[in-house]
Amino acid sequence: MPRLVLLPGKERSILKRHPWIFAGSVARLEGRARRGDTVEVVADDGRLLGRAAWSPDSQIRARMWSFSPDTPIDHAFFKRGVAACVARRASHPGLAGETGLRLIHAESDGLPGVIADRFGDVVVMQLTSAGADKWREAIVAALVQATGCRAVYERSDSEVRALEGLAPVTGCVHGELPEGAPVIAEGAVKMEVDVVAGHKTGFYLDQRDNRRLTGEFARGRDVLNCFCYTGGFSLHALAGGAKSVLSIDSSAPALEGARRNLALNPALDAARAEWRQADVFEALRALKSEGRSFDLIVLDPPKFAPSAAHAARASRAYKDINLFGFRLLRPGGILMTYSCSGGIGLELFQKIVAGAAADVGVDARILHRLSAAPDHPVGLAVPEGEYLKGLVVQVD
Ligand code: SAH
């Protein structure tokens, strides 16, 4: 097996069980390895540290599969790893019955570059690293065996694949997709999931618990849901007894999905829902000049800062929408505001939101600090796996 030899001292992060080996930590590769091949990882003093996948095109030059020097990386490894992820979800009291569920959350689940989401009896798989791409067949077989699903659909069309020298791959890799889109239930709300053309793997499962909380806050309130995608927060607000819900997104297909989702839930009062296709930055200003105001506002924008390098520009964008959020809130109103940017930590996000409230001249307090649902765990050794943060803020 080829050997990746580290520079002196560069074994430290591996000993802390962090799975990434950056290009700058590598002294040399002994032997030949092709993209995705398994390599033995060796410290400068010759100590064996484990096995990793070789990513020659990426700044993350290798990702650890195992921190034990003698675990073979083979079909049985993926069978065990995938089954363990599925079993962890099944043993979680809040996740066991979910029909929409993240089964594998990449690095934080011990399988770098592997994402798998279950929607009913369809599993959507996304492979984002050279090593994961190499083991496609083993991962698919393991998913089928662990879940008994009817189909596995691959959505390896994330732009991060380019950093690994990988082209996009999409399509059915096991079984056949059912006729209609899979439908999942989040509490009382049914949602269909466009696994072929939807964002990411089709649905933002990470916000499941936070959508539920919106439902709990919504009774009797006029709600504004910005960046609504297929209407998740909107439908939960309606189910929770909102007086009205105005939902805004710039994407026509997302809004069509939202309307179909509303129709899937005949118990909800469609007359209370208003949909607007618009740019949120402009729409917030327009709502202010129309004299509109709301009791509950949800801001769940796309990733403005994929990495820390984008933090300054992203901060301005977060500040802008939160500023208008506060301007549009009635006294006693509630802002549920999120950032899914890895490059913006909770501390910075809270500062931005506080700055927006101060600029508007309102006093406000944090009722809840929110994160992704527990099927999106954060590996203790991989703090950069934490990306979603939310604040529920009430104004005076
Ligand atoms: N809250 C949603 C997920 C939001 S994803 C849920 O719970 O499912 C972010 C959404 O923002 C996407 O639907 C995207 O189409 C939309 N979007 C991105 N930029 C936008 C902009 N400037 N104005 C309006 N919508 C935007």
Image (spheres, rainbow, N blue to C red):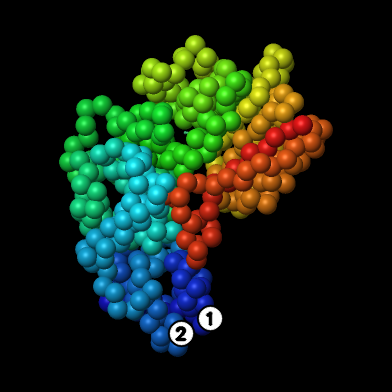
Q: Residues within 10 Å of mark 2 (few under 14, many from 20)?
A: some
The residue shown at (51%, 16%) is: 273
- Residue 292 got which mark? none
- 94 on left or right of 276: left
Q: Which residue is at the front of the view, 156 or 102?
A: 102
- 287 on left or right of 303: right
Name the residue beneath numbered marker 1: 9
Q: In this figure, what is the number of numbered marks? A: 2
**The C terminus: image quadrant:** top right
Can the viewer see residue 113? no
Residue 1 at x, y percent in the picture? 27, 77
The residue shown at (29%, 37%) is: 120
Q: Residue furthest top?
A: 271
Name the residue beneath numbered marker 2: 44
* Three-letter amino acid code at the position of disc 2: Asp
Q: Residue furthest right?
A: 361
